[in-house]
Image (spheres, rainbow, N blue to C red):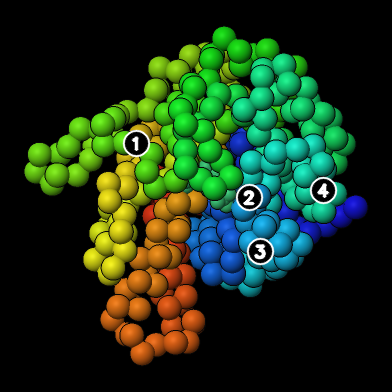
Amino acid sequence: MVSYKDLGLVNTREMFKKAINGGYAIPAFNFNNMEQLQAIIKASAETKSPVILQVSKGARNYANQTLLRYMAQGAVEYAKELGWENPQICLHLDHGDSFELCKSCVDFGFSSVMIDASALPYEENIALTKKVVEYAHQYDVTVEAELGVLAGVEDEVASEVSHYTKPEEVVDFATRTGCDSLAISIGTSHGAYKFTPEQCTRDPKTGRLVPPPLAFDVLDAIMEQLPGFPIVLHGSSSVPQEYVDMINQYGGKLPDAVGIPEEQLRKAAKSAVCKINIDSDSRLAFTAAVRKVFAEKPAEFDPRKYCGPARDLMTELYKHKIINVLGSDGKA
Ligand code: G3H
Ligand code: 13P
Ligand code: ZN
């Protein structure tokens, strides 16, 4: 048994309380490799933003859970080296799908876990979430649960259609499970194709897709039911058009990729939404930078020469999110 506290990590409790009171949201960035982690820590340290490092099932399969945990431990030291005296870094399991997986992360030094039983029938979701909460709370590890279903195309997180969270269920769910935060469905989804062209309109000037707004009425109704309770938004990448254009310009093929407009995330961050999950935007930045180097310098074969620019672009992206979208800069 390893306690996250001995690794210099923190859980989400204080982070969320301050974020709700302060009208901002904590960035939850996924990482799968060293360059992503370096970029996240550099951006967080330079802006003094609390941050949640997320490890998905896909990341565990790709990079190994043990290695990722030690990397997160190293990240705390790296943050201090960068001059961040009191780093507020949480290591979180993203989309945990079983009690055993959540338990293994708690036992191994994660400071927060998500049990995503949202695809199960309501009572089964409650039972599994409660079991994880009872275990995790013994070690002061915080637990995120999910109610409602996101549409999406991610490898490990797939559903054809979204079902918005039912506001009338949230009090019962939060009370009976004891979860610390609740991921809800209000129209976000995973990946770089969050809406079909049929769901969007087109900007007549640019020809770009304009997505429909998020269901803020559902969010408002949830907040009314659960005043001050930490709400989480998954699938919150904006799919910046500049990265999509760069990828397409340098030989990629991402037609009609579309995300959540930043002004909608800004609005959400000011509410009880206190954790905003972003993964795809980082993948796009990485890919755009690598493709550019490959196209412009075809003789280059030192991975540092293309992973370095990718890391720089991701750092810029994370800082932009922290400062201009979530408002979490200067809060740690
Ligand atoms: O929620 C999904 C995250 O973007 C993680 O995706 O399972 O492909 O690592 P992944
Ligand atoms: P995006 O695919 O929009 O980046 O969402 C990531 C996410 O929700 C991770 O859990
Ligand atoms: Zn997610």
Question: Quadrant of the rendered structure where residue 140 is?
Answer: top right
Q: Residue most toward the bottom?
A: 299
Picture coordinates of residue 311 (x, y %)? 46, 70
- Of the numbered discs 2 and 1, the one sitting upstream in the chain is 2
Alpha carbon distance from label 2 to label 1: 23 Å
Residue 246 lies left or right of residue 100; in this view the side is left
Dot 2 beta carbon under 8 Å from ligand 1:
yes
Do we see residue 41 in this rendering? no
Report the disc number at residue 63.
Answer: 3
Alpha carbon distance from label 2 to label 3: 10 Å
Alpha carbon distance from label 2 to label 4: 14 Å
- Of the numbered discs 4 and 3, the one sitting upstream in the chain is 3
Q: Secondary structure at mark 4?
A: helix
Label 2 neighbour load within 10 Å: few <14, some 14-19, many 20+: many
Nearest to the observer: residue 185 or residue 253: 253
Picture coordinates of residue 323 (x, y %)? 41, 51
Q: Amino acid at mark 4?
A: Ser
The residue at the point 39 percent across, 72 percent down is 290
Label 1 neighbour load within 10 Å: few <14, some 14-19, many 20+: many
Residue that mark 4 sits on: 104
Residue 121 lies left or right of residue 308; in this view the side is right
- Of the numbered discs 2 and 3, the one sitting upstream in the chain is 2
Alpha carbon distance from label 1 to label 4: 35 Å
Label 3 neighbour load within 10 Å: few <14, some 14-19, many 20+: some
Q: Is residue 223 above or below residue 75?
A: above
Report the disc number at residue 56.
Answer: 2
Picture coordinates of residue 321 (x, y %)? 42, 51
The residue at the point 79 percent across, 31 percent down is 133
Q: Residue most toward the right?
A: 1
